[in-house]
Image (spheres, helix red, strand yellow):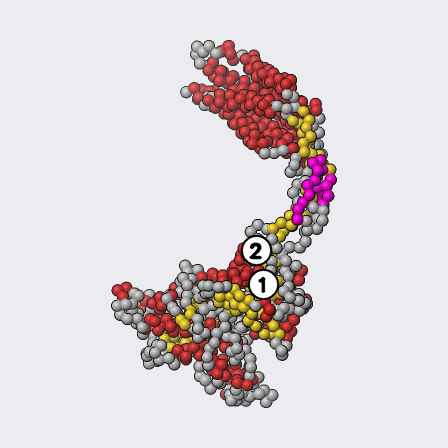
Amino acid sequence: MQIRFVLSILHFCNCIESTCRLTGSDIAPGMSMDGNIIIGAVMNVYMDNIYPSINYKERPGPAICTTFMLYPYQRAQAMYFAVKEVNKTPDFLPNITLGFQLYDSCAVLPSAMSGTLQLLSGHGQPVPNYRCNQYSRLAAVVGHSTSTYSISLAHILGLYRYPQISHFSTSSLLSDRIQFRSFFRTVPSDAFQSRGLAQLVLHFGWTWIGLVALDDDYGQQGIQLVKRDILQAGACVAFTEKIVSSRQDRNAPHIVRVVKHSTATVVVFFSTDVDIGFVLDEMLRQNITGKVWIASEAWSTSAFFSEKKYSNLLLGTIGFALLSGSMPGFGDFLNKINPSIVVGNKWIKTLWEQVFGCKFQDQTSANNFSNSLIKCTGQESLEGIQNSFNDVSSLRVTYNVYTAVHAIAKALSDLGKCKKGDGPFPNGTCADIENFKPWQLLHYMKKLRLNTSDGRQLFFDENGDPPAVYDIVNWQLSPEGKLRQVKVGSYDTSITSGDVFTINTSQIQWGTGHHGVPASVCSPSCPPGFRKAAREGQPLCCFQCIPCPSEEIANHTDSLQCIKCPRDMWPNPTQDHCAPKTQEFLSHEDPLGVTLMVTGISSTLVPVAILGLYICYRTTPIVRANNYSLSCLLLVSLSLCFLCSLVFIGYPQYEICLLRQVTFGIVFALCVSCILAKTIMVVIAFKATRPGSQLRHWTRPRVSYLIVISCVLIKIFLCIMWLTFSPPFLEVKSESNSGVLIIQCNEGSPLAFWSMLGYLGLLASISFIVAFLARRLPDSFNEAKFITFSMLAFLSVWLSYIPASLSSRGKYMVAMEIFAIQSSTWGLVICMFLPKCFIIVFRPDMNSRERLMKKQKSCNI
């Protein structure tokens, strides 16, 4: 495999005089200058491309870059200028010539990745994990300007520990040192900008802000930080919209409609200049006026919008801009560029044709050159032309490229000045500047201290971020009628004493229709029925309209307090005046009451149907084995249990209040006492089958009847005592936190009510305990298992009812009791009779004396 890999590498390489060049067709466009140490760069000079059609019959060709941009090309020349400047200082890197390789990404990710791999491989076709150019060592990579691209590049470069310095990627994601250990930047993170933007909006008293952001890492991470800091600072967010880069119109019509109809006067745009251009064009079509735009650093100083058509729209815009810096001699350097220069000659010719409107004539097109085209002579001069390429009045992103090159050169200089024995590596060793490893240079990048040309010091914190310094710019009209960005303040986090945020309001020129500082309030006026209240953790200027509390109204706009209604009245639905309270009880017309009533009536039919089934099969062993008479009595009592729930529905008249709890208690006492009698009889019947047992005379049916009658009589006695000394009565209750008058039955004595439930619980508990202890008796003689589960269900329902009833009121408390009655009754029906009915109807083979005696014999064995 190793021999095959070497042969594949030799196939790609064309070595001449011990210098290897990788060959291939997919070479990214760029410019380069030879040197002992190479600084790589991936940045966009073209802003668009065309992908050739793919027919899968031949190798797909590379993307074709289409739109050549002047100001990005200025950044490429800034790198050339910085490298030459470093080489002119002999003491800086003695005996070392610095070179560079710059590749154009055309503002698309595949081209950026291709350029990065070519930097790692050497000139030409990229081969992963192999570098062909052995005599020029790659030191670091500058780029990219787009955060999403920088993230992808950082994953690749981080594998090899190559230092990467971005000049325009501001996403806070790139500050994650776990993922991006070799990433640095000369531009502040958006985390700092978001705090500055929050201070900016609060400085002018703006508390109602709209947010619009590009749907990439830069836009979404940035706008989330802005939103977080704005909310924490006390302002309110009116809306948050996305500029959808995958759509041709960038979602501009929708965004503009939202902005147009929003009451927010101030809108923060976190986007690139190219993408926001679609939104601004749509605003011109819809004639949006009276808004103040807050610009992020990506477009706050863009030359894209210098056209006159944007003047009225963007006048008064305030934005954060990257710190501008000076590059002495750079203006003359740009003006002296001409087509005779070898470095980047192809791009220079493109620049020439675009600036001077001419065309170069080459040998291949000499015969086809049209006389109507102006021929480029190469003798034209840029000094008489003023455009975004040679404009050096406010260098910002270009200055960051220049600073990035000097930062790499300073780290190389520090590496070369290391003295043996005092080095940072094991045993005090130093790195060899002629044969250093990328991770060794990375160490010096982290320790970097660079004095820049504008008198500041550049260093990187633990996340690879520089000190955050911004200019605050205002878009104003020049005397010539063109938009220009005027510095009106600054935001400098490196200041240790004094105000980090400074702005001169008197220098700001606001847009059309604004006299003085425009207002952007957080909340509209509160209508009647609402009162103004400050939002928690936010200033009072950002209030919310909240409804008045119960029994209170607000009868005028912007009320600070609500007025309490009289005790027998309640606010109307709009809470702007008081009205009589409505009555509440569980009626037959109420959907909840209708549901419970239908459920109770239909449920009554189930025990009746089972009773009919038992009567039809009364001679079968499974019916006779479990006390047929007692089972029929139990089924009747279960039907009555369902029916007694109907007494709780309807207007609670005095007579109903007296009888409903008593009826419920007596019927349920009959039901549970039947189950208790069946449980006791099952145990006695099993014990009586043993030889010499004295319990045979207790197996008679009258014993079970005696148990039932005794338990029911005790319950009747308790109910008579309750009705005698503290009977239930009708009560009309007015709750202070409710808009209704509750019509209900007061149970008179809570002790009597809970004693009634406690007695039922005692009977159920005794049945549960006895049945549980007798659960292992032979199946042919007992139904202890069924009784155990039925009592467990019964007790669970009523134990759950206790806390539920204490936390409810009015008709819901009544509905809770009805639900407990019906659900506990259903539990008894299902657990006690469903298995037997299943055998009777679907398994008649099991309902035979032979099967029953066989199981008995098996159990006795």
Asked if disc 2 and disc 1 are in contact, CB closer than 8 Å, the reply is no
Q: Is residue 769 above or below residue 7?
A: above
Q: From the viewer's side, name the closer residue of 386 and 485.
A: 485
Q: Mark 1 points at which residue?
A: 268
Q: Which residue is drawn at 59% across and 58% down?
A: 240
Region rendered in magenta:
560-579
Q: Is residue 277 above or below residue 330?
A: above
Assign a secondary structure to mark 2.
loop
> In the rendered image, which quarter is residue 817 located in?
top right
Q: Which residue is drawn at 55% across and 25% down?
A: 832
Answer whether residue 618 is visible to the viewer in this image. no
In the rendered view, does 529 fall on the left or right side of 462?
right
Q: Main secondary structure of the magenta part?
A: loop
**The furthest residue to the front:** 498
Query: At which x and y percent is residue 760?
Result: 56, 22
Q: Is residue 569 above or below residue 791?
A: below
Q: Quadrant of the N terminus?
A: bottom left
Amino acid type at circle 1 is Val
Q: Which of marks 2 and 1 is nearer the N terminus?
A: 2
Q: Which residue is drawn at 59% across and 31% down?
A: 805
In the rendered view, does 658 fall on the left or right side of 180?
right
> In the rendered image, which quarter is residue 92 located in?
bottom left
Query: At which x and y percent is residue 322?
Result: 51, 69
Kindly report the distance in space between the C-alpha atoms of the residues bearing marks 2 and 1.
16 Å
Numbered label attached to residue 234: 2
Query: At which x and y percent is residue 720?
Result: 63, 17
Query: At which x and y percent is residue 271?
Result: 55, 65
In the rendered view, does 690 fall on the left or right side of 312?
left
Assign a secondary structure to mark 1.
strand
Amino acid type at circle 2 is Gly
174 within the magenta span = no
Answer whether residue 2 is visible to the viewer in this image. yes
